[in-house]
Image (cartoon, grey):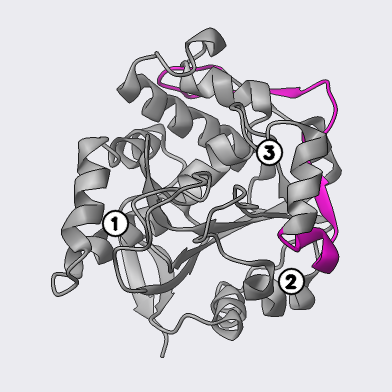
């Protein structure tokens, strides 16, 4: 069967909640809400208020992890300050998963490059997860969506370096690029396995710059907003977003984003994830008015 991906061209907090409800997914127990808190100075990340209708309805805790590079999110102290500055902790309970060690090490049963994933120990406090992704370009990965959130987004600071270096954290910026993309697919699969059926995904195609929300001096968005997608399949939802970008032929900024994706071989993470078998590139797009 094809994976179902619900889609609406309307981009609003209320539509996020409506599409989530279409999944018919009851996330049990303590729910981790994985967002991107946004680097200081970034103008494109989705603000806390955008998720309010959804979070007011389902509850849960905003979760983030520290970065592996210099900036305003690479230590717990600085990250907490920025999370407050951006308004997250003013509106919701927030948990930095790797606020203090030691990490939890997840064994990856099926993998291309890495057999372990290092994540903050606080992940053990949650029974389910809702992955809230801002779909856009990325300087290294080509694009950022659900699969990147599952991998680099959830990995601890050390785990991020480990993924970037394909198992050699000292090679965080010098490792083989395609191996890095495959390592992201490996790490994402370990989170899918960890939560089993108790995980779901929402991708928002808004403020689509070629740069990630981790970039403090990001380019302004180059494409018009496309919509919101929801699925229980992280591979299908990312593939659907890529297909919607390629279908937007009348958008003058389309080629700029496509160039970013293709120049970084961004589709490889989807190809690698599909080969690992925790989702499918074959999907049914169900449009909701």
Q: Quadrant of the N terminus?
A: bottom left
Residues rendered magenta in the picture: 86-115
Disc 1 element: helix
Give neighbour class at mark 2: few <14, some 14-19, many 20+ (Cα, 10 Å). Answer: some
Q: Could you say whether the residue bearing mark 2 is in a helix, strand or loop?
A: helix
Residue at image mark 3 = 73
Foreground residue among 79 and 8: 79
User: Real-space Cα distance between discs 3 and 2?
Assistant: 23 Å
Q: Nearer the viewer, mark 3 or mark 2?
A: 3
- Give the quadrant of residue 240: bottom left
| Residue carrying label 1 | 242
Q: Residues within 10 Å of mark 3 (few under 14, many from 20)?
A: many
| Percent x, y of residue 48 | 68, 67
Q: Nearer the viewer, residue 124 or 1?
A: 124
- x then y, percent, for residue 152: 55, 35
**Is residue 108 visible from the viewing direction of this image?**
no
Specify the farthest residue to the left: 249
Q: Quadrant of the C terminus?
A: bottom left
Give the residue at x 46% y 48%: 217
Residue 143 vertical position relative to residue 107 in the rendered view, above or below: below
Distance from disc 3 to disc 1, alpha carbons, whole Å, reads 28 Å
- Horizontal and vertical percent position of residue 27: 72, 62
Q: Residue at x 40, y 24 (%)?
A: 180
Q: Residues within 10 Å of mark 1 (few under 14, many from 20)?
A: some
Provide the residue designation for mark 2. 55
Q: Is residue 266 left or right of residue 197?
A: left
Q: CA distance from mark 2 to mark 1?
A: 27 Å
Confirm whether the magenta stretch covers residue 9: no
């Amino acid at each position: 069967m094809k994976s179902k991906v619900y889609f609406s061209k309307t981009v609003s907090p209320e539509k996020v909640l409506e599409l989530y409800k279409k999944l018919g997914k009851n996330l049990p127990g303590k729910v981790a809400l994985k967002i991107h808190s946004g680097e200081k100075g970034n103008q494109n990340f989705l603000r806390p208020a955008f998720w309010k209708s959804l979070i007011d309805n389902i509850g849960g805790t905003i979760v983030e992890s520290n970065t592996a590079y210099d900036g305003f999110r690479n230590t717990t102290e600085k990250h907490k300050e920025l999370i407050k500055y951006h308004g997250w902790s003013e509106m919701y309970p927030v948990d930095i998963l790797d606020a203090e060690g030691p990490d939890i090490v997840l064994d990856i049963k099926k993998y291309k490059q890495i057999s372990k994933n290092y994540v903050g120990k606080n992940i053990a406090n949650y029974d389910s997860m809702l992955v809230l992704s801002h779909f856009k370009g990325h300087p290294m990965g080509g694009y950022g969506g659900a699969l990147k959130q599952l991998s680099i987004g959830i990995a601890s600071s050390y785990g991020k370096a480990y993924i970037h270096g394909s198992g050699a954290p000292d090679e965080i910026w010098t490792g083989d690029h395609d191996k890095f993309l495959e390592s992201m697919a490996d790490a994402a699969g370990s989170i899918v396995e960890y939560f089993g059926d108790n995980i779901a995904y929402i991708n928002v195609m808004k403020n689509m710059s070629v740069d990630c929300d981790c970039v403090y001096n990001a380019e302004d968005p180059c494409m018009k907003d496309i919509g919101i997608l929801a699925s229980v399949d992280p591979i299908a939802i990312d593939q659907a977003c890529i297909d919607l970008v390629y279908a937007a032929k009348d958008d003058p900024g389309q080629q700029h984003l496509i160039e970013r994706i293709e120049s970084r071989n961004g589709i490889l993470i989807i190809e690698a994830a599909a080969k690992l078998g925790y989702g499918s590139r074959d999907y049914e797009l169900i449009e909701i008015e």
